[in-house]
Image: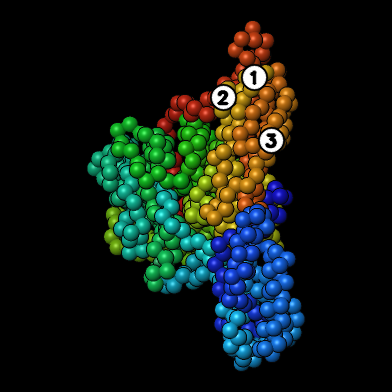
Amino acid sequence: MRSFFSSLSLSLLGAATALVALPAHAQPVQSLIIKLKPLAQQVQTSSQTVAQSSKSAGRESAQARSENHERISALSRSSGVLVAKHRSLGLEHQLLVLNKTVQGQDLEDTMRRLRLDPQIESVEPNVRLQLQETTPNDTEFAQQWHLGSSQVNASALNLPKAWDRTTGSGQVVAVLDTGILPHPDLVGKVVPGYDFVTNEVVGNVSTANDGNGRDSDPSDPGDWVTTQEAQVGCPKQPESSWHGTFIAGQIAAASNNGQGVAGVNWGAQILPVRVSGKCGALLSDVLDGMRWSAGLHVDGVPDNTRRARIINLSFRGDAPCSSSYQSVIDEVTAAGSLLVVAAGNTPGEKGSLQLRRPADCRGVMAVGAVDAQGAKTSYSFIGSNMALMAPGGTDGVNSQLLSTSNSGVTSPEVAIYGYKQGTSFAAPLAAGVASLMLAINPSLTPQALIARMRAAARPHTFTSGLSQCTGATQFTGACNCTTNECGAGLLDAGQSVLLAYAPSAVIRLIGTPSAGTDITLDGSASAAVQGASVARYQWSVVSGAVASLQNTNSPVLKLKLAPSTQQYVLKLQVTDSLGAVGEDTIAFASTAPVDSGGGASPWLWGVGLWLLLIALGVQKYKEVATKHSDINNAA
Ligand SMILES: [Ca+2]
Ligand SMILES: [Ca+2]
Ligand SMILES: [Ca+2]
C-alpha cells in the first residue's frame, strides 16, 4: 500500500487536474516563462533530442543550452530586465528567474520590455495556480451539508474537490428500489429500466400495486400499506416512501441547473430497476434485478442494453448472507459491476446490530451511516465486512439528507424535495462517488473501487461524550467508530477521485490450477488512465510455495505449481508512464492432479470445488421478502 500512495502523488503532477490562476498581474511573481523565436539550427537540435530517446525528451543538448544562454544574456542587456538565472522548460520555453519580485504595473512594464525584443515570441508570468473547488448553483445545495466540505461537517464528502476533476460523463448507475417518478431535477437523467416486481398476493394486498407482474415500466405507484392491509409479513406503512426517486436524485440529480438539489455525479444516468412494491421486495426479484442490471440475461425479460457498472442496493438485512445471494453477487461482480449496499438499520433498540445480507456478503461495498460529526448513528448496523461509512442523517430536518421526492401520501402527486435518514441514503453517496471514479478510470474493477475508496477514506472521528462502538451485539446508541466495525473510515469523494488516477492491475487465471502443473496468470488487461500507459509489470508471490517463477516483469506470468496441493496468493503491481502504481492480488487453491491416483485429501478437493462453485455461481436460492434500510420518521 505504501508504494501505491507514494507514487500516486507523483502521478497527480501529470494528471489532468483543473487548475485556475488568480488574475495574473495581481500576484507577485519572481519568474517569467518566455518563448524565443526558433533559430533553424535550434529546431534541428530539438528534433534530434526527441529522436535520441524518449527518456531524454525535453532535455537540452549542450549546444542548445549554450545558445540559449547567449541569447538570454543578450536579451537581458537589451531589455534592461535583470535575469538571475534561467533554465529550459520543455522543448520550446525558458524559465527566467528575475533578480527581484515584480507585481502589477512593474510586472506589466517588465513583460512589455521583453516583448519589444525581436527574439521573443511570447512572455507570461510564472503565476501560482490554485485548486478550484467546484460549487454547483443548485438553489438547495447549501442544505446538502453532507456533500460539502469536511471542514464544516466532519462527515461531509468533500465533493467540490472531486468535481474539480470530474463531474461525471454518462456512467450508468442502477438503483434497485421502489421504481422512479418524474421530477424536474431528474429530467434527462434516467435510461429505460424495468419493473421486476412479481405480483403476489400477501393477505389481501397485491404487492406489485401496478395491476400486473413484471413489465417495462418501472414507475413507482407507491408502497403504502394500510392498517387494514397490514399483517404478519406485511407491516403497516401509512405513507409511500418514494425511496427509489430519492436515491436516484442523490446519485444523479440534474446539477448546476439553478434549481433544487445537486447529485453526486452530474453526468450519471440512472437505470431504475423496480424490485420493491408493497410489503417489501421478493428476494428472487432482487436477484434477477441485480443480474439484469449487470447486463446478464434473465429469462422472460428483454436484455438490458445499458449495463450498469455500479448497482445500488438499499435493503435492510434480514438474514445472514445466503448461498443464492452470494452466488449472484459473485456473478455480477465477475461481470464487472460493483454492488454498493446499505449496512442496514436496526428497527428499534432491541436486537443485534450485526450486518446481514447483502451487507455481510463477500465482494460488496457495505456502507454504514454516520452523523454530521462522523459518529456512528444509533440505527446503523456495523460489522467486520463494512467497507466504510458515509453520512446517513439524524433526527431533525437540517440533520437529514435532502433529495428528490414526491408529495403523494399514498399514490404519486407532485414532485417535491424531501428529507430522509438511514443507511439507505448513505450507500448511494458511495455509489455516486464510485461512478465518478469510473469517469476518470473506466478500467477500475469492483475490487479496485472498494480498495481505493477504502484507502481514500478519512479516519473515523471522535465525538466527546460518546462511548466507543464495542461490536455488533447490542444497541448502544450513537458511538465512536473504530475500523473493527465501521470499515476503513469516512467516505471522501475528493481523495477517492484522486486515487482513481492510478492504473488498474487486473489478473486473470487461465487454466486449472492442478498441483504440479503449469498455469498462466494474465495481467494484460491491466490499464492506465487516458493519457498514460502501463510501463511496467511486477509479479510476486505473497504466499504459497511456487516451484518456479519466471519473467516476473512480463504481462503474462507462467507459473509452475508445487506438486502438493496448497493455497496461493500472488500479486501484480503495474506502474504507469506517469509513475503511478496500482496492484491486484489473486488467491486460489491448487487441486490434486486428476491422474494422481487419489492421493489428495477430500478436504483439499473441497476447497477447489468450493472456489469453482463461487466462480460459476450455480447455487440455488430461496425466496423471502426484504425491506429497505431507511428510517421512516412517519412510521
Ligand atoms: Ca408491474
Ligand atoms: Ca410497472
Ligand atoms: Ca438541481
Mark 1 beta carbon near ligand 1 (under 8 Å): no
**Mark 1 highlights which residue?**
517
Quarter of the picture containing the C terminus is bottom left
Horizontal side of 568 relative to 16 (left or right) equals right
Q: Position of residue 22 (x, y in %)?
A: 58, 79
Q: For mark 3, what is the residue?
A: 552
Q: Judge whether 549 appears above or below 555 on screen.
A: above
Residue placed most toward the observer, 269 or 52: 52
Q: Nearer the viewer, mark 3 or mark 1?
A: 3
Residue at (64% x, 91% y) in the render: 106
How many angstroms separate mark 2 from mark 3 (CA)? 19 Å
Name the spot of residue 524 as percent of width and height, x first: 57, 38
* Few, some or many residues within 10 Å of mark 2 (<14, 14–19, 20+): few
The amino acid on which the numbered mark 1 sits, given as a three-letter code, is Thr
Mark 2 vs 1: CB contact within 8 A: yes
Give the farthest residue toward the front.
41
Residue at x 61% of width, y 76% of height: 36
Q: Amino acid at mark 3?
A: Thr
Mark 1 element type? loop
Q: Nearer the viewer, residue 188 or 380?
A: 188
> The residue tagged with tag 2: helix, strand or loop?
loop
Q: Is residue 479 left or right of residue 429?
A: right
In the displayed structure, 304 sits above or below 56; it is above
Q: Which residue is mark 2?
A: 511
Q: Quadrant of residue 259?
A: bottom left
Picture quarter with ligand 3:
bottom left
Q: Nearer the viewer, mark 2 or mark 3?
A: 3
The answer to which quarter of the image holds residue 107 is bottom right
Identified at 59% across, 73% down, the residue is 38
- On the image, the x and y values in percent for residue 41 come to 62, 69
